[in-house]
Image (cartoon, rainbow, N blue to C red):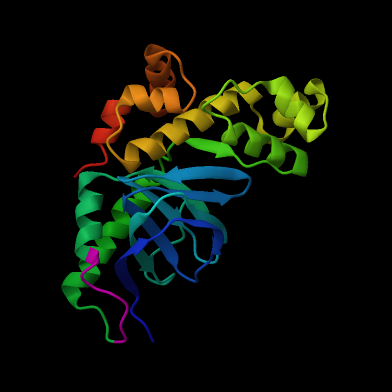
Amino acid sequence: MTREAFAFARDFDAAPPSELCVDRHYLLCASQGALRLEAHGKSWLLPPARAALISAGEPIQVAIPQPVTTSSVLFDTRFAPAPPAPLTVFDLSPLARALVSECVEWPDATEPLPPYARSVFGALAAVAWRLAQHPSPVTVPAGQSAELRRALAITSERLAGDVRFEDVAREVGLAPRSLARRFEDETGMTWRGVLRRMRVLRAIELLAAGEDSVTTIAHTVGYTSLSAFNAGFRDLTGRTPSQYRSSFRP
C-alpha cells in the first residue's frame, strides 16, 4: 500500500498529446517550460508559477511543446476532498510554491508519512484547494466537431502571419457564415476572440521558454504593434508580459 500522499519532480522532453488519468487527486506544476492540457472541450496552458488540480479518475490530454520540468503531488481520495472542479489551472501563491518544494522530499513509498510530512501535505491541500476556487482565465476552446477542430489547428499554425478567417473557412470546406456559427455554438466565442486568446497563450509559452524580448515575442505571435500586444495580454491575464514573466521566478 502506498502513502496517502507523495510527490516527485521530473524532467520531460517535448512530446505530442497523450492521456493522463490517475486514481488520486493530482496537483501538477511546471517549474521550467510549459505544458498544454485539454479536457471538456477546452485547452489550458501550464507555465511556471501555475498549477493544475486534477480530480482522481479524470482523463485529460497532456502535450509538451517544449522541454519541461514538473513537480507533481498526488493525494489519496481519503486524504483530501474532491477538488472544486475536474480540472482547474490557477496561480500558485508563494506559500503554495514553498509547500510543493517541501512535499517533494517525500516520494512514493510503502511506509506511512511521518507526522510532519502529513501536516505539510495537508497544508498544501488546503491552500491549493482554496486557490483552485479562482481559476486562470487563460483558456482556449478545443472544439467538438472535426471542422472546428481543423479550423482551430489552422489558426494556431498561422498565428505569426496574416491569418484570415475567410481563408480558414475555405480550407475546412465551410462558408464563412457557417464557420462563424460553429464558433458561436461550440465555443461561445467569435473566431477573432479565439485568435486573441491563442496569441496570448503562445506568447506565454515563449515567455516561459527563454529570454526573447517582449517585442520579439509580440511579432512572433502576430502583433505588429507592441502597445496592442501589451493591451491584449493585460486584458486576458491582468498583467503585462514583463510582469507575467517575472511571476515565473521564485
User: Please, is residue 6 above or below residue 99 in the view?
Assistant: below
Nearest the viewer among 58 and 162 is 162
Query: Image check: 207 left or right of 106?
Result: right
Quarter of the image where one finds residue 247? top left
Residue at image coords 21%, 67%: 119
Query: Image check: 83 left or right of 72?
Result: right
Q: How many tags in the picture?
A: 0
**Is residue 16 found inside the magenta-colored segment of the image?**
no
Residue at image coords 16%, 71%: 116
| Spot occupied by residue 152 in the image (x, y as percentages of width and height) | 65, 36
| Spot occupied by residue 76 in the image (x, y as percentages of width and height) | 40, 72
Residue at image coords 40%, 23%: 218
Q: Is residue 69 visible?
A: yes
Q: Is residue 240 visible?
A: no
Q: Quadrant of the C terminus?
A: top left
Query: Image check: 222 left or right of 248?
Result: right
User: Please, is residue 70 above or below residue 203 in the view?
Assistant: below
Residue at image coords 28%, 58%: 124
Nearest the viewer among 42 and 164 is 164
Numbered range of the magenta stretch:
103-110
**Is residue 107 found inside the magenta-colored segment of the image?**
yes
Magenta span: predominant SS is loop
| Spot occupied by residue 50 in the image (x, y as percentages of width and height) | 35, 45
Q: Among all residues in the image, which is located at the extreme left?
A: 116
| Spot occupied by residue 60 in the image (x, y as percentages of width and height) | 55, 57
User: Please, is residue 81 above or below residue 196 in the view?
Assistant: below
Q: Quadrant of the N terminus?
A: bottom left
